[in-house]
């Protein structure tokens, strides 16, 4: 029997940068613990923020990611035409396209099957993006006792 759970919720607002949100996701989705095997699909409902999976231990990785993406998609590039929402908006759209709006993570034994050093990032590309909405869909086989 395949089991499905879906929930949409708001993440806490964060400033521009790369932020670990693994605990927040797991806290909002306690049903992960009911799956023997399955998939967790995360989708962010925004065009100026993204989701990524990367280093969860050393915060300098997140700072380096922010620095690199700011060089890759700089503010105030003279060729940008979409400028009415501020200098951080068009670069935010570019970064979101590069990093993506969704992640799919395996579930094994009631836990996200992340690697030892992997964490889920909210990549906030606006100076003040506010609260971001995420849809999480879980599917798979329930643990035998459910």
Image (cartoon, grey):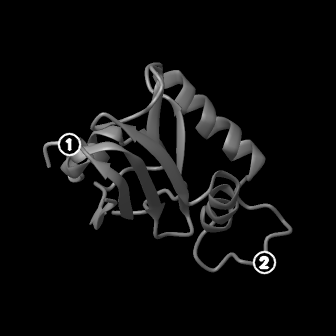
Q: Nearer the viewer, residue 77 or 39?
A: 39
Residue lying furthest left: 145
Q: Residues within 10 Å of mark 2 (few under 14, many from 20)?
A: few
Residue 131 image position (x, y, % from top left): 33, 63
- Report which residue position mark 1 lands on: 144
Residue 146 image position (x, y, % from top left): 14, 49
In the rendered view, does 93 fall on the left or right side of 59? right
The structure residue drawn at horizontal position 56% and vertical position 60%, both measured from the top left corner, is 101
- Report which residue position mark 2 lands on: 81
Position of 33 relative to 115 (above/below): below
Residue 114 image position (x, y, % from top left): 44, 31
In the rendered view, does 144 fall on the left or right side of 63? left
Camera-nearest label, 1 or 2: 1
Position of 142 relative to 129 (above/below): above
Position of 98 relative to 22 (above/below): below
Residue 103 image position (x, y, % from top left): 52, 51
């Amino acid at each position: 029997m395949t089991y499905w759970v879906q929930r949409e919720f708001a993440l806490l607002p964060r400033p521009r940068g790369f932020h670990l949100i693994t605990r927040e996701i797991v806290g909002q989705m306690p049903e992960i613990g009911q799956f023997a095997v399955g998939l967790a699909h995360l989708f962010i409902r925004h065009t100026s923020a993204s989701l990524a999976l990367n280093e969860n231990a050393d915060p300098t990785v997140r700072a380096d990611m922010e620095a690199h993406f700011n060089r890759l998609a700089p503010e105030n590039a003279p060729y940008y035409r979409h400028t009415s929402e501020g200098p951080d908006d068009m670069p935010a759209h570019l970064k979101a396209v590069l990093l993506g709006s969704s992640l799919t993570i395996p579930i094994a034994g009631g836990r996200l099957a992340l690697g030892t050093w992997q964490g889920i990032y909210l990549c906030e590309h606006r100076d003040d993006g506010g609260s971001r909405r995420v849809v999480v869909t879980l599917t798979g086989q329930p643990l035998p006792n459910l």
